[in-house]
Image (cartoon, rainbow, N blue to C red):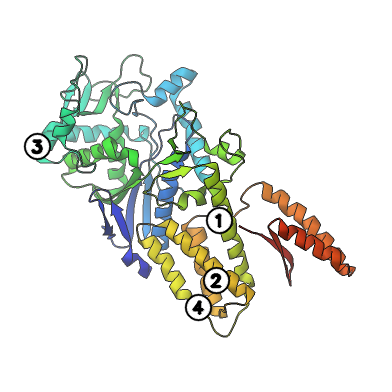
């Protein structure tokens, strides 16, 4: 176990403060993250959430924990207005396109996996589906009914929030008060089977036109959206586990309902640490397909959109997202992505210098202080922007060492190189590939100019050689002559 593990503090949404992380079982972490509802292409806001928890997963693994990471696929039960009325999102898509619901699920699950692979996220250890756990959900409903916290009416089963709140606190995660919720809610229409507007569905009766349906003790129907996560997290992580994550928009009602369901049947708090990633906006506004203020990941990668000036690869987009803390709102814009791309290239160029650093008999700065700063950043609630800032400080020292203004021993060079590689590649999950397709063409064009310059120098035509070097430098491209040939760097 890495010594830094003892210093990890995580912001717990349940307490509203940072807390020392102590797993239930030493050296093992159980983490559940709410996955996508697969009825459309995954959008960038979702991607930011999954990249944030990929960072958490990666750092926990770096610290030496054995992590069981569970992330579900919602392929049934998520109604279109996030409540208990309306049509199942997947069924609606299937009806509109006249295809099977599972065809919709397959198409967009493949898109989800393909997109997250492009962002270099690690797959979870278990990726269960709602439809694969209908039996478990029915058994939980039976248990909640037996405990007296639910009621059945006309083939549907609802969680009784008012009864639950008599002995528990419904609203403990979101900080809501049930009396205020009741006061601010309109009376139910005569067509609703609910006793109270705050009650939520555990099982919904399937009307004749509903495509996705399963038999149950209460008749043909389908599970409520909130129930699946309780069923799957409990099955794979136990009645109590360490971390539950998701987007900020899921805190209420989804995660609030998960707590109520679990407490009702297991009589204990299901999760020690609740984590919520904040939203991604676009040009200062909420992303929405209806307003056109929206961009899909593939449109970002290909540049096939009217919002951005060019394509940005997935590694740059990931770097951009990690430059903000996961709990802060992040605004995506053309200027912000271009700035991130410049920073990304600067980091890449700095790391590329590491193998070429000259070794000295002594070090003029303490490498261990820089390494400690990396750990301190990540131990402070996975503060990736501070980590990146510390990496840039290290790049400055690398550049100064390469110029001869600072010195490092061979041992410190190796230690720095190994640690930076761990944090950049293993923790931040960057690949440091070419930032755009344009760099490939830039490499080819510059290789021609470098070859011409080498020929000029071989012919002792130093005027032409210097002219090529100075003309490129004026454009922000610096040539560097070394024992292995000539390389270039781009000025930021």
Residue at figure coordinates x 87%, y 69% from the top left? 458
| Residue 183 % position (x, y) | 15, 28
Residue neighbourhood size for the residue with mark 4, other residues' Cα within 10 Å, grouped as few (<14), some (14–19), many (≥20) = few
| Residue 314 % position (x, y) | 55, 46
- The tag earlier along the polypeptide, 4 or 3, is 3
Q: Which mark is residue 166?
A: 3
Instruction: Report helix, strand or loop for mark 1.
Output: helix
CB atoms of marks 4 and 3 within 8 Å: no
Query: Of circles 4 and 3, which is in front?
Result: 4
CB atoms of marks 2 and 4 within 8 Å: yes
Residue at figure coordinates x 24%, y 28% from the top left? 201
The residue indicated by pointer 1 is 343
Give the CA distance from mark 3 to mark 2.
Answer: 61 Å
Residue at figure coordinates x 63%, y 47% from the top left? 436
Residue 1 in view = no
| Residue 426 % position (x, y) | 49, 59
The number of discs equals 4
């Amino acid at each position: 176990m890495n010594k830094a593990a003892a210093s990890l503090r995580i912001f717990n949404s349940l307490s509203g403060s940072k807390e020392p992380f102590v797993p239930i079982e030493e050296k093992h972490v159980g983490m559940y993250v709410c996955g996508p509802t697969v009825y459309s292409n995954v959008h960038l806001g979702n991607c930011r959430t999954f990249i944030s928890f990929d960072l958490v997963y990666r750092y926990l693994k770096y610290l030496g924990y054995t992590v069981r990471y569970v992330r579900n696929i919602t392929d049934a039960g998520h109604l279109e207005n996030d409540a208990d009325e309306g049509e199942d999102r997947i069924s609606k898509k299937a009806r509109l396109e006249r295809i099977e619901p599972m065809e919709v699920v397959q198409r967009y699950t493949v898109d989800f996996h393909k997109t997250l692979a492009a962002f270099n996220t690690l797959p979870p250890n278990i990726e269960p589906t709602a439809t694969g756990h209908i039996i478990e959900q029915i058994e939980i409903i039976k248990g909640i009914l037996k405990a007296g916290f639910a009621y059945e009416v006309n083939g549907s089963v609802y969680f009784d929030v008012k009864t639950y709140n008599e002995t528990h606190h419904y609203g403990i995660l979101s900080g809501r008060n049930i009396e205020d919720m009741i006061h601010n809610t309109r009376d139910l229409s005569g067509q609703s089977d609910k006793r109270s507007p705050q009650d939520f569905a555990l099982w919904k009766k399937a009307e004749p036109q509903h495509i996705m349906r399963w038999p149950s003790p209460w008749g043909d129907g389908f599970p409520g959206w909130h129930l699946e996560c309780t069923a799957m997290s409990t099955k794979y992580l136990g009645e109590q586990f360490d971390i539950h994550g998701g987007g900020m928009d899921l805190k209420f009602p989804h995660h609030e309902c998960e707590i109520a369901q679990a407490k009702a049947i297991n009589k204990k708090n299901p999760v020690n640490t609740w984590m919520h990633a904040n939203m991604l906006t676009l040009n200062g506004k909420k992303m929405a397909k209806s307003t056109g203020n929206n961009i899909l990941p593939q449109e970002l990668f290909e540049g096939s959109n009217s919002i951005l000036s060019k394509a940005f690869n997935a590694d740059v987009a990931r770097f951009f997202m990690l430059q903000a803390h996961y709990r802060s709102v992040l605004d995506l814009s053309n200027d912000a992505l271009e700035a991130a791309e410049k920073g990304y290239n600067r980091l890449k160029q700095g790391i590329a210098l590491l193998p070429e650093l000259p070794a000295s008999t002594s070090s003029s700065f303490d490498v261990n202080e820089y390494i400690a700063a990396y750990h301190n950043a990540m131990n402070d609630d996975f503060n990736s922007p501070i980590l990146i800032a510390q990496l840039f400080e290290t790049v400055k020292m690398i550049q100064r060492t390469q110029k001869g203004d600072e010195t490092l021993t061979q041992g410190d060079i190796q230690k720095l190189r190994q640690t930076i590689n761990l944090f950049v590649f293993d923790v931040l999950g960057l690949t440091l590939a070419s930032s755009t397709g344009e760099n490939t063409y830039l490499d080819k064009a510059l290789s021609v100019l470098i070859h011409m310059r080498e020929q000029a120098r071989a012919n002792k035509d130093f005027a032409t050689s210097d002219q090529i070097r100075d003309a490129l430098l004026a454009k922000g491209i610096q040539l560097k002559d070394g024992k292995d040939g000539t390389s270039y760097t781009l000025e930021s």
